Amino acid sequence: MKLVIVGSGYVGLVTGACFSEFGYKTICVDKDQDRINQLNSGVCPFYEPGMEDLLKKHLKNTKLLSFSTSLSESIHKADIVFITVGTPSRRLEDDADLKYVWAVAEEISHNIKKYCLVVTKSTVPVGTSNEIKRIIEKTVPKENFDVVSNPEFLREGSAINDFMRPDRVVIGTDNKKSENIMRELYRPLYLRETPIFVTSIESSEIIKYASNSFLATKISFINEVSDLCEVVGANVQDVSDAMGIDQRIGPKFLNAGPGYGGSCFPKDVKAFISTAKKFDTNLSIINAVHESNKKRVIKIVDKIEKNTKKNSSLTMLGLSFKPNTDDIRESTSIKIANLLNEKGYQIKCYDPEAMENVKNEKYNFHFYNTAIEACRDTNAIIIGTEWNEFRALNLIDIGKIVNEKIIFDLRNIYNKDEVIKIGYKYYGTGK
Ligand SMILES: NC(=O)c1ccc[n+]([C@@H]2O[C@H](COP(=O)([O-])OP(=O)(O)OC[C@H]3O[C@@H](n4cnc5c(N)ncnc54)[C@H](O)[C@@H]3O)[C@@H](O)[C@H]2O)c1
């Protein structure tokens, strides 16, 4: 089976490299020439553990993976073409901006010459795959293509493992022929006993948004519980540990923190609410989650303001939206640091992988090459992202170079009593 993946970002590149690992000949296409040049020389344009090794293996050794800027030159070799372009929020709107998806659908429609299965892997609102079908149908005979929905559930930071060992594969289809092709494609996973859910196209599109919105709900739920814990002197970690052990609840996504961010949850929650509105349906719980999460950053900034000197220096450790990625889209660390900076604080910062991306965004931050350097002469340390290297900082040594020994542990990675014992003022989340 020969595959073409359109959009070589986090999802497209991981998908392409992992399908090569399954043994399929795969061409990843992107309209960004610089990105394709980088990929052709074996360099991964973003930080994802294991990605560069897999890229080099299939680009240079097996030669199963190749890259191109031309969809028209690649598509005639394809049995399956995947759409993996971005679906960000529309500017100043909540719904998903589908312009990249429509552009790819148009391009596909002018280039299909023999039967080809078109797979929507981008996260798209219900109805989108059928609209893609209508676009292609204008120029391609019905018997020469089908469209299926196959949402992706990988997480940045563990993307390769998530793709190779997913909890499930979802295939949304309206006919047996494309179901069979997709089952054949995912046969290597089926042999590993991965559950495969074949649903209608509409259900498949909703499964992705409902899953992300549910996880965002869990996060916002425990965040609000943590606010109550702080007021009454309870410890949210004890609460979530004892809740999470209940198999009906589960421990994941039950860690209190600065709110959800990243390239998916914020935009997907908004798009889900917006899609439901179009169909006159009120997703009131998810709406409340969105509102609660928006207030989270302000609440944390208030807490930091109340407990630090005005216009002093603060250190933000961690800028990516989560550890093990350099992705800074909707990063809560950056939102918090930026708001504090607007209120007059000097921001010193350090991140193991995301600093270059932040520098390109022109924030008024001071960048340092190590966590320790970023802490020198600071009035408070804020742990914004729980990178492993922040879990074992030598707080005794750091205590000698700071102006004031104050820690805001937004991710609850330190033991409160131990940190207080060595002379710090400690502010965790919900404890
Ligand atoms: N990032 C994640 O963790 C993740 C996880 C699951 C699902 N998703 C979904 O997958 C989709 C892709 O997300 P991403 O994070 O990989 O996006 P991304 O922004 O990293 O990558 C998108 C790529 O598509 C390219 N592109 C845009 N238009 C194109 C065109 N016409 N032809 C060729 N290339 C084009 C861009 O240049 C870019 O490189 C989104 O819908 C997202 O919601 C993302």
Image (cartoon, rainbow, N blue to C red):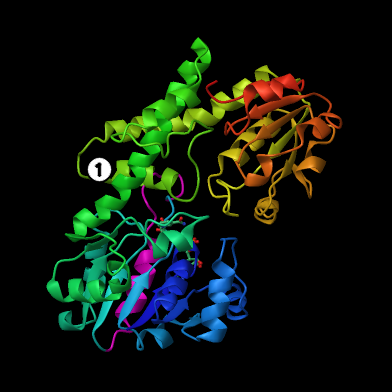
Image quarter where the N terminus lies is bottom left
- Residue 112 lies in the magenta-colored region: yes
Q: Quadrant of the C terminus?
A: top right
Q: Position of residue 180 (x, y in %)?
A: 19, 75
Taking depth in this image into account, of 125 and 134 the one nearest to the observer is 125
Q: Looking at the picture, does residue 332 appear above or below residue 300?
A: below
Q: In the image shown, does 277 or 251 lie closer to the viewer?
A: 251
Q: Amino acid at mark 1?
A: Ala
Front residue of this view, candidates 279 and 374? 374
Q: Which corner quadrant of the figure contains ligand 1?
A: bottom left
Determine which quarter of the picture holds residue 371: top right
Q: Residue at x 46, y 82 (%)?
A: 70
- The percent position of residue 286, horizontal first and vertical second, equals 32, 35
Answer above or below: position of 402 versus 386.
above
- Span colored in magenta: 90-113
Image position, residue 347 (x, y; %): 74, 36
Q: Which residue is mark 1?
A: 276
Q: Residue furthest top?
A: 232
Under circle 1, the secondary element is helix
Q: Relative to 307, say whether 184 is above or below.
A: below
- Residue 367 placement (x, y as % from top left): 77, 46
Q: Is residue 60 above or below residue 424?
A: below
- Describe residue 381's horizontal placement relative to residue 263 as left or right: right
Is residue 108 found inside the magenta-colored segment of the image?
A: yes
How many numbered discs sit on the rendered protein?
Answer: 1
x 69%, y 18%: residue: 307
Q: Hey, which quadrant is residue 253 in on the image?
A: top left
Q: Residues within 10 Å of mark 1 (few under 14, many from 20)?
A: some
| Quadrant of residue 140 within the rendered picture | bottom left
